[in-house]
Image (cartoon, rainbow, N blue to C red):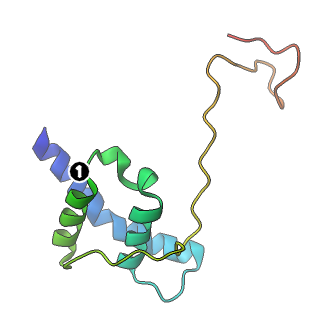
Amino acid sequence: MKALQEKITGDFAKALPVLAKLLIALEGIKNAKQHEVVSDILKHDRDNAISFLNVLDPHFSKIYCKLKGIDDIPTPSNPSLFNIPAQAQTPQQGLLNLRGGEGGESTDQQF
């Protein structure tokens, strides 16, 4: 199981600069390298970026640097180079609007 987790973490570490390149294009980020954007992603939006890997940050950084042939991940910028997406509201459990629309109508059924 540990070997599989390491492989998945390594695969994601390889893909992260590609995602950074897309973010650079989408956000119109000027004068930033992929590793700098990766650093910002890990600092400013870590939960969305790598929390699913269930790996400690130093371990991920070590894997990332080894795979990318760099000594260390650059220091993140402050403020972030990109707009951090707002966290989506978690829907309330037990409420279901069967009629559609805006919700909150008095005839909505609750389950």
In the figure, is residue 70 to the left or right of 92?
A: left
Q: Which of the image's four quarters has the N terminus?
A: top left
* Residue located 59% across and 67% down the image: 83
In the figure, is residue 59 to the left or right of 101?
A: left
Quarter-wise, where is residue 63 in the image? bottom left
Pick the residue in front: 19 or 55.
55
* Residue located 50% across and 70% down the image: 23
Q: Residue furthest bottom?
A: 31
Q: Mark 1 points at which residue?
A: 8
Q: How many labels does the image show?
A: 1
* Residue located 81% across and 20% down the image: 99
| Mark 1 crowdedness (10 Å alpha carbons): few <14, some 14-19, many ≥20 | few
99 lies above or below 66: above
86 lies above or below 62: above
Provide the secondary structure element on which disc 1 rests: helix
Give percent across and percent down for residue 64: 23, 66
Quarter-wise, where is residue 91 in the image? top right
Pick the residue in front: 6 or 61.
61
3 lies above or below 10: above
Give percent across and percent down for residue 38: 38, 70
Pick the residue in front: 98 or 47.
47
* Residue located 45% across and 84% down the image: 32
Give percent across and percent down for residue 37: 43, 74
